[in-house]
Image: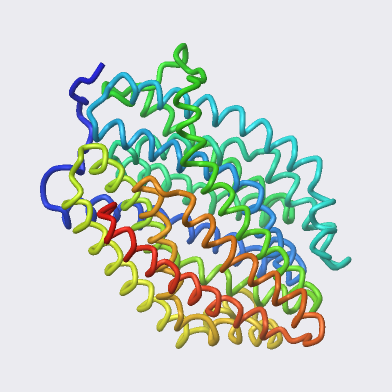
């Protein structure tokens, strides 16, 4: 049954630029707060516990992204499906999609908790984690995975809110969560001397807080996205749709992270100083991803709603605007990071060797951020127009196969840390070339 959706923010009407910007800005601010509290985690760990603790927490990032990133793909798939039915003004299927997404989130949370807690030491051994870092890294990972339900369900619930065009409430909840995390970090690490376990516990408690706030909002809503616990169950047709859009994205995330784990293993071979320096840079680099994440999420919702409403001309104008904004913003951030790299890295740990490794990575990659931004937003565009396989294949070849090939061949005879720096702009450039060709072909076929 097709009816008029109630009170959702339809992006199929009104000013294109205003709709995208107003939707993207709260996401940007929210991601900024999230990145800030992730960075504060590392600042507190690096300065209050020490270099090995910073290396331990930093080196676990690729493993966390590998396991959790795979399941996040299904959240993105659910958001695309919900956005499509909202754009088509089909309340019945929108409601089914919302409750199916919640059910899938619960199931996936249980699975990832089990896998993460049981296999944390095994995963750390796979990436050759040094002995002086292993114990702290293992402790951090196990606590983090034990409470990952908060993170997974938060992303599922926020995906539902954003699919309806609501990016303001997720922002509010993320700010509350971020501030809470900082206070808990200081409390657990500074007062109770809990070490890296305290940092992990602070993170998961703050994520549970944001999850409960999001759930409360959706349960009290009078809109079509309202959650009723008695309706939470899997609807087979919706599950198939979510898998159609989500599985390629999940595989894409997994593929990229597998390659990054190989790179992290290579970094680990240079010792804890290199791990700490590169890890500090990765935290800084996270800020460059903010406009990418913001416009990627905005474009997925915008494109899905307009595709569902059959407004392709409006969709095309939004795509051009989203790409332009992303490329300009991320390159400006890259220039700032290139210039300020020594000060930014030393804020985490002032040991000269740590700063050296972090600055080296920044000076190689920062000016090429526009390539990374273009590739990521174009991947979201492909998913939004119903072509999720394209970004999966592109990332498999350009970002995974090439990186793996380089480190299993050149990396074995040329043991140089700079290889881990240059591999990123090279593979970003390859994917950008392929995506431009794909966009041209889709335009010729009038798919976009």
In this view, 268 is above or below 181: below
Q: Between residue 256 and residue 175, name the one nearer to us.
A: 256
In this picture, residue 90 sits left or right of residue 423: left
Residue 209 in picture, x, y percent from top left: 50, 37
In this picture, residue 264 sits left or right of residue 364: right
Where on the picture, by quarter, is residue 329?
Answer: bottom left
Residue located at (71% from left, 83% from top)? 417
The quarter of the image holding the N terminus is top left
In this view, 243 is above or below 380: above
In this picture, residue 72 sits left or right of residue 193: left
> Residue pushed farthest front?
445
> Residue pushed farthest right?
131
Residue 180 in picture, x, y percent from top left: 50, 47
Residue located at (53% from left, 47% from top)? 248
Residue located at (84% from left, 60% from top)? 134
In this view, 350 is above or below 293: below
Residue 408 in picture, x, y percent from top left: 77, 74
Where on the picture, by quarter, is residue 342?
Answer: bottom right
Q: Between residue 446 and residue 203, name the one nearer to us.
A: 446
> Residue pushed farthest left?
14
Q: How is the image coloured?
A: rainbow
The quarter of the image holding the C terminus is bottom left
Residue located at (84% from left, 57% from top)? 135
In this view, 200 is above or below 429: above
Residue 97 in picture, x, y percent from top left: 40, 26
In this picture, residue 195 sits left or right of residue 358: right
């Amino acid at each position: 049954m097709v009816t008029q959706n109630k009170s959702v923010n339809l992006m199929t009407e009104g000013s294109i630029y205003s709709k995208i910007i107003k939707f993207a800005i709260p996401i940007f601010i929210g991601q900024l707060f999230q990145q800030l509290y992730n960075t504060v985690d590392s600042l507190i760990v690096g300065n209050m516990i020490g270099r090995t603790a910073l290396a331990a927490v930093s080196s676990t990032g690729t493993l966390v992204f590998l396991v959790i990133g795979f399941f996040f793909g299904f959240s993105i798939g659910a958001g695309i499906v919900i956005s499509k039915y909202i754009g088509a003004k089909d309340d019945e299927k929108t409601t089914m999609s919302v409750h199916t997404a919640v059910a899938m989130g619960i199931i996936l949370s249980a699975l990832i908790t089990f896998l993460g807690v049981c296999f944390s030491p095994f995963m750390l051994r796979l990436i050759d984690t040094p002995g002086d870092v292993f114990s702290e890294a293992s402790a951090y990972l196990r606590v983090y995975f034990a409470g990952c339900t908060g993170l997974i369900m938060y992303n599922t619930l926020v995906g539902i809110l954003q699919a309806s065009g609501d990016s303001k409430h997720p922002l509010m909840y993320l700010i509350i969560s971020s501030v809470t995390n900082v206070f808990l970090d200081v409390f657990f690490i500074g007062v109770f001397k809990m070490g890296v376990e305290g940092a992990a516990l602070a993170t998961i408690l703050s994520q549970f807080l944001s999850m409960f706030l999001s759930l409360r909002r959706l349960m009290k809503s009078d809109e079509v996205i309202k959650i009723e616990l008695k309706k939470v169950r899997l609807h087979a047709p919706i599950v198939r749709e979510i898998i159609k859009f989500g599985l390629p994205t999940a595989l894409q995330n997994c593929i990229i992270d597998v390659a990054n784990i190989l790179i992290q293993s290579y970094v680990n071979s240079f010792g804890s100083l290199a791990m700490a320096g590169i890890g500090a840079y990765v935290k800084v680099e996270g800020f460059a991803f903010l406009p990418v994440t913001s416009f990627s999420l905005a474009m997925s919702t915008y494109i899905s709603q307009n595709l569902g409403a059959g407004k392709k001309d409006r969709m095309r104008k939004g795509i051009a605007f989203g790409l332009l904004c992303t490329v300009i913003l991320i390159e400006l951030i890259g220039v700032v990071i290139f210039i300020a790299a020594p000060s930014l890295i030393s804020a985490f740990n002032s040991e000269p060797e740590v700063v050296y490794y972090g600055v080296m990575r920044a000076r190689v990659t920062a000016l090429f951020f526009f390539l990374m931004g273009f590739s990521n937003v174009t991947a979201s565009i492909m998913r939004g127009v119903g072509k999720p396989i394209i970004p999966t294949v592109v990332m498999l070849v350009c970002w995974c196969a090439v990186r793996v090939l380089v480190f299993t061949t050149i990396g074995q005879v040329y043991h140089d840390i700079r290889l881990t720096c240059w591999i990123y702009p090279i593979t970003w450039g390859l994917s950008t070339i392929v995506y431009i060709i794909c966009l041209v072909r889709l335009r010729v076929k009038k798919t976009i």
